[in-house]
Image: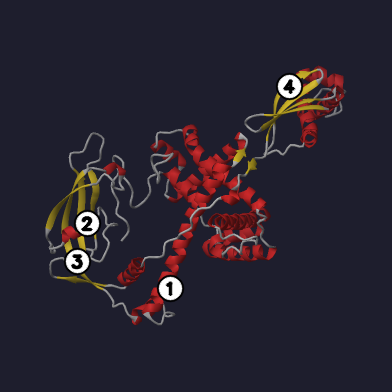
Amino acid sequence: MKIEKQITDNHQARLTVEVDPETLEQSKQRAARKLAQRVKIPGFRPGKAPYAVILRQLGEGAILEEAIEIMVDDIYPKVIEQTEIEPYGPGALENIEKLDPPTLVFSVPLKAEVTLGDYKSIRIDYAPEPVDESKVDGVLRDLQARQAIIEPVERKAEPGDVVHIHLKGVRVDPESGEAVELVRERDFSPLIPTEAEDPSDEWPFPGFARQLIGLAAGDERQIEHKFSEESEYVSLRGADAVFTVKVIEVRSRTLPALDDEFAQSVNPEYASLEELKAAIRHDLEDEARRAYNEEYEERVLDEILSQSTIKYPDQMLEHEIDHVIERMEERLAQQGMDLELYLKSREMDMKAFREEARPVAERRMKKSLILMELSDREKISVSEEELQNETSRTLGQLSQYMQPKDFQKILRDKDSSTNLVGNIMMDMLLRRTLERIRAIANGSATDEQPGETSPAEASGEETAAETEEAAQLSGEQPEDVATEPVGQGSQAPDSGTTVEEPEQ
């Protein structure tokens, strides 16, 4: 067997294989016997007819086609072994150049190759900001609001009150195709924020509730508003609207005092208000540190990626696009929508959507390849004991959230269990690799291995890269995809879509 190997620009191995004619003849004999098992030949039991009879009955073409399949199955593993290539996936018979001697051309996608740059010289300032005390106060106010006493009063509305209203909203001078109705008629109970409270998250627009100050039960008011050019509702940017309000009831809101008794009502473990504030501050610091680290690691990865060379076959990228679309389908399902309906709303077919997903998939794939190469280069490892502990923790979580029969199915199914452990192992390796490159970039790295991944970090929660990928495909960022799938609750309306308020 003679083989010529050519590596193409798209990271495929083009293998031209010349086979001994005797091998083809042997394959034709086997093919004839195989065909004779499936086709009834008069006068002979299945598989017992002589070759000449089978040839006469079925024809040279049918036998040759079956023979080539048999020959390919036989020689392909030997071809891969002899050429010493590392395939990414199964190859394909691209062409039969000739039959005398038999010469076959295979195209084989190759395993990706990553050449890292001098990543150890990368330095990026690492300066997480301390948690502002106002954020601690904000959490305290939220906890305080949950224990507020709400009761009706016979007076005009004041800051701090909750006002139960009947509300509707319309667009002023709508253009062709734009919805007139912005808010369907409904009852709604906004809180009038005090001077100390942030109104930026108010619905239907910041400052709306303060327009209710001075109104009593039975009063009506029309509130005009021009949405800013930076409104989160894209289709309402710059739009003029009129909201009609009728007050049903004014309710006072009495907040509990922020003292030691309040802290104990939140959690008996806290003996004082200062202990509660310390716990809040600690949680906020952990959250801020995780968010900063994720953003920092993305910056480091971007820098490593810019210095690296990655070769990969087209099939790998197409496979990654499949994964991105699968994740998109899962997110749409959570919003009560399927991909077909989503594509119709976008006036887009699957081919166009795959092209739209391509940059997201390519970025994700390249970063995964970089991380795996870094993991190998830095000799990142997970001990058997650590893996067992993390698997036990994950199974404990799954048992709480899954239906018992579904959980038992995972435990009983060998493939499911193996995949679960493999995914946990991969998550731990990648998290430790990210920790390592963060330490290298901020100058704190030593020659020691990174420490054990914390349970929170090694859990199945989405990574920053996955969140970014999903955001891009769902329209939460302007890059790559322009329109988001229609969700539930608060959403940016296009023509004919009403504005929904968030849950109260």
Of pointers 2 and 3, the one earlier in the residue sequence:
3
Task: Using the image as rendered, state which of residue 12 and residue 418 is in the foreground.
Answer: 12
Q: Which badge, 3 or 1, is on the more N-terminal residue? A: 3
* The one of 374 and 152 positioned closer to us in this rendering: 374
* Residue 248 seen in render: yes
Q: Which residue is mark 2?
A: 207
The answer to which image quadrant residue 264 occupies is bottom left
- At label 2, the amino acid type is Gly
Q: Nearer the viewer, mark 3 or mark 1?
A: 1
Q: Which one is in front in this view, the residue at disc 4 or the one at disc 3?
A: 3
Q: Amino acid at mark 4?
A: Ile
Give the labeled residue for mark 4.
96
Q: Which mark is residue 279?
A: 1
Mark-to-mark CA distance, 2 and 1: 32 Å
Q: Earlier in the sequence, mark 4 or mark 1?
A: 4
Where does residue 82 sit, x and y in percent of width and height?
80, 34
